[in-house]
Amino acid sequence: MRARRVGKVAQASLLLTVLTAGSASAYDPYDPRNCNGFEWDDKRALVVQKVTARPRVSFVKSPYDDDFKAETCPASTEACRQKAYLVAGDLVLTGKTLGSFTCISYQEKKQMWATGWLPGTALTPVAPMPSPKISDWLGTWSHPGGGVEITRGAGGKLHIEGVMLVPAGKTTNNGVIEAQATPQNDTIAFVNDGSVPFENMDEPGCRVRMQRIGPWLLVEDNGDCGGSGVTFSGLYHRKK
């Protein structure tokens, strides 16, 4: 069994430490050395990368790991190496970079994300499908917690519907997307129902991008497509 789940345990421990440490700790969520995973960018599409280090690559600590004792991390030292790791072929969603390290998010089988630094040399970008045909988008695409269905819409557009459910204690938060959109080059991008151009940055609400990455449908959103903690972001597989 891979040790990748250790990364989630470490994150949970870190969160507990932050919540209970009070003013005595200098935790800064905006510290550039702190990896919080990928982030939405209005002007730049998310980049998927593949782990190419063999046979595996370990996550690298942020400064606040180990009960705030990893202040020299991230760094290429044994002390900064986590037990959690990914293996060659794993796909990750990438965020910011810091020196030779890249902040990544890896989706596990359930609705759980492992986030952390990886050496940039262990990753290779995966280019999106350059000119997807309409048939390349169509289908029912599945993802832990929900899915997206893409069908032919009116006027040559695509009709997109999605539902996402995220457990939140004794309740469940949900998100819904429904839009008509026309693919542009290698991307589908829309805001709310698709009636307003995506380029209109003044339009508030749910902003979504989609790309075809190998056999996958990559979806990313700005976090405003549902209740607290709900996101459609991730790699979806097409149901047969």
Image: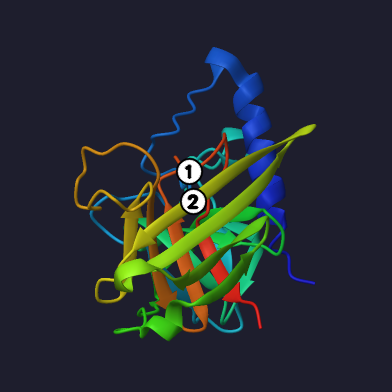
- Residue at 42 percent of width and 76 percent of height: 212
Image quadrant assignment for residue 20: top right
| Residue tagged 2 | 177
Q: Where is 163 relative to 69, above or below?
A: below
Q: Horizontal and vertical percent for residue 8?
A: 68, 50
**What number is the disc on residue 106?**
none
Q: Could you say which is closer to the camera, residue 169 or residue 2?
A: 169
Circle 1 residue:
225
Residue 214, position in %: x, y?
Answer: 47, 84
- Quarter of the image where the C terminus is located: bottom right
Q: Is residue 235 above or below residue 44?
A: below
**Residue 37: % across, % down:** 47, 51
| Residue type at tag 1 | Cys
Q: Quadrant of residue 31?
A: top left
Pick the residue in front: 27 or 208. 208
Is tag 1's residue or tag 2's residue first in the polypeptide sequence? Answer: 2
Marks 1,2: beta carbons within 8 A: yes
Figure quadrant of the N terminus: bottom right
